[in-house]
Amino acid sequence: MNVTVIGAGLAGCEAAYWLAQHGVSVSLYEMKPKKYSPAHHYSGFAELVCSNSLKAARVESAAGLLKEEMRRMGSLTLESAAQCSVAAGGALAVDRTLFSDYITEKIKTHPNITVISKEVTEIPDGNCIIASGPLTSDALADAIGELVHKRRLSFYDAAAPIVTAESIDRSVAFAASRYDRGDDDYLNCPMNKEEYERFYEALISAESAPLHSFDRADGLKVYEGCMPVEVMAKRGADTIRFGPLKPVGLRDPRTGHRPWAVVQLRKENADGTLYNLVGFQTNLKFGEQKRVFSMIPGLEHAEFARYGVMHRNTFLDSPRLLHASFSFKERPGLYFAGQMTGVEGYMESAMSGIIAAKNMFRYLQGKPALALPADTMCGALSRYISDETVTDFQPMGANMGILPPLNAPVRDKKERYRQLAERALASLDRVLRQEGEE
């Protein structure tokens, strides 16, 4: 059995190593050191570019739960992190060079892995996992574009924040569609004139996040094609009030009158546990997003499952293209992994490499794909990237909001997260035991 893996980032290394550990011969293609993306500079594999932090370590957090699930599935990333960690309070942080060197050595010395230093410009025949990352080279990105009949997204991405449904104040936010058309799929956060003016002033004076040099190069593409709300607002005090915050066709049930402005929230997933702030693509710093967007009536205590981001990104319209196994729907034996699939973050990317590898292995054995429970973090993320009900697909990182709610509601967030984590790990253990018995 032989599998080609393209890309030696976190996802590609996890996929190659997991398969090799299970007796599969792997050809791992990596264009470094012959060619580098605009963000990469180190010759080693699994290079951490933006930060040395792998986020929270405690299992009662979304990031910590994801890592514990990965650890139980034999993650090379976490093995390396344990050897190369540095003090970072409650977070897992690593020495980036040592971290990369550790994984590079594990990959290059594995008897079942052949490393080929070459840029891949066409998708190879046979069994293959593409894990080339959000900065995929132009030639390979074009080949992927042809494969998916142009159903891909490859541009400077400005995504809106997402909040958890249970954190929205329903005594303020009301369900309604404009002019009573539709199925009331939107929640509406009404503002009076005074509330809007305070919000507007905070929005236009908030601090934006800096862009990488390779993002700045074509920054105008974002502003014309996917306008950040703070940029739109600076065009005039009423610009967003006649744009994404237009109140026409809506009446506040508390007053019976049309609000001065309305922020609409749209369901982000089929379960209705997450809501997207419609038209709020943004490049504000995360702390500023929390401060400013919490001024919106009904969102004063909002839990942000994902903050808005703006950066260059190449990712698939995965709900139309991929199964939850990370397999490509139109070609058996072809899998994708990493941030290209729509998972957001280092550990999420690594996780997808493990899941793609496990399912590739089952495919080679003639077994059905591994169905991870939706109440696990890995299962929930896999389900999110393959959820065909998501129409405006944007990348998603680990967060407790994508997990199904507990049977009995728990008001205390810390206790709720603890119970969600316990349930997830128990579910994962059951599946892993069953998988080992087959």
Image: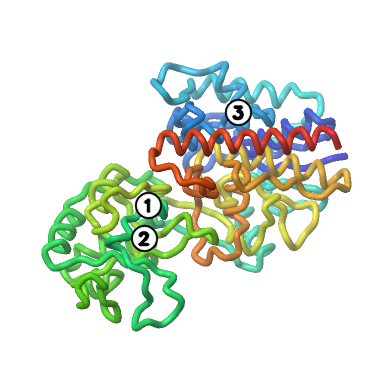
- Which quadrant is the N terminus positioned in? top right
Kind of residue at disc 2: Leu
**What label sits on residue 77 in the rendered view?**
3
- 6 or 337: nearer the viewer: 337
Residue 319 position (above or below residue 437): below
- 162 or 274: nearer the viewer: 274
Q: Position of residue 151 (x, y in %)?
A: 60, 66
Mark sitting earlier along the chain (2/1): 2
Kind of residue at disc 1: Gly
- 8 or 191: nearer the viewer: 191
In this figure, which residue is indicated by the disc labeled 1?
A: 308
Report the side of 202 relative to 360 (left or right): left
Distance from label 1 to label 3 (Cα)? 27 Å
**What label sits on residue 413 in the rendered view?**
none
Decide: marks 2, 1 in contact (CB < 8 A)? Answer: yes
Q: Position of residue 346 (x, y in %)?
A: 52, 37
Q: Position of residue 82 (x, y in %)?
A: 56, 19
Crowding near the residue tagged with mark 2, few <14, some 14–19, many ≥20 C-alpha atoms within 10 Å: many
Q: Residue 189's quadrant in the figure?
A: bottom left
Mark sitting earlier along the chain (1/3): 3
